[in-house]
Image: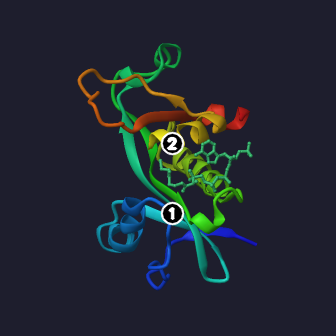
Amino acid sequence: MISVRRLRPDDERKDFRSGNIELDRFFLRYAGQNQFRHHIGTTYVAVEEGAIFGFATVAASELTSARIAAAARKRLPAYPIPVLRLARLAVDVRAQGWGVGLLLLRAVFALAYKMADEVGCLGVVVDAKPEAVEFYRKLGFVELDVVAGLLGDRPQPVAMFIELGAVERA
Ligand SMILES: CC(C)(COP(=O)(O)OP(=O)(O)OC[C@H]1O[C@@H](n2cnc3c(N)ncnc32)[C@H](O)[C@@H]1OP(=O)(O)O)[C@@H](O)C(=O)NCCC(=O)NCCS
């Protein structure tokens, strides 16, 4: 059975292939040092018998309340709001469609609840790749209001957010 745990220094990361070379390179070169040396982000891996099928990297972050939908914004103070950022998410091509992405997201939501209890957290934010927007939408993520001036010609990541209250309803 596949389970989710924190990345360990001796985890074998070089065989992981998600189909996205930047995500694979991040996992191989930076996930470890970000977690073990710099402490700026923690990676969780979906593993079974030592084989890694997917990973999710998270970090504490904040969101200006201006970017949150008007209805929710009314109940919030104007200063930046603490959130958990899903910085990277990838599943090995051999395991895509098995529910590993969902399993990792559940672990991320559990972390966000823990963060809410212990230090404060409104929800989870992600910069979704255009091809992954529907994956997040199905889980209840909504698009954040766009900050003017950020739109260009290249396909941009779509900033998406889910409040912890909406996780319960999903
Ligand atoms: C996107 C990704 C993380 C999804 O993980 P996964 O393990 O394949 O997804 P799951 O098997 O957990 O799927 C859960 C649900 O989402 C759906 N889904 C999966 N990928 C999807 C996509 N790209 N678009 C729309 N729906 C998607 C599944 O059909 C399933 O829906 P169902 O429960 O109604 O059947 C994975 O395909 C991946 O790593 N892709 C390449 C890298 C990438 O795009 N990462 C996202 C960076 S923001």
Q: Is mark 1 within 8 Å of ligand 1?
A: yes
Amino acid type at circle 2 is Glu
Residue visible at 59% across and 37% down in the picture:
134
- Rendering coords of residue 57 (x, y %): 46, 59
Q: Is mark 2 within 8 Å of ligand 1?
A: yes
Q: Is residue 45 above or below residue 123?
A: below
Residue visible at 48% across and 19% down in the picture:
69
- Rendering coords of residue 120 (x, y %): 48, 42
Near-viewer residue (83 or 69): 69
Residue placed under numbered mark 1 in the picture: 18
Residue visible at 58% across and 64% down in the picture:
93
Amino acid type at circle 1 is Ser
Residue placed under numbered mark 2 in the picture: 131
Nearest to N terminus: mark 2 or mark 1: 1
Q: Residue furthest left?
A: 149
Quadrant (top left, top right, bottom left, bottom right) of the C terminus: top right
Residue 77 sits in which quadrant?
A: top left
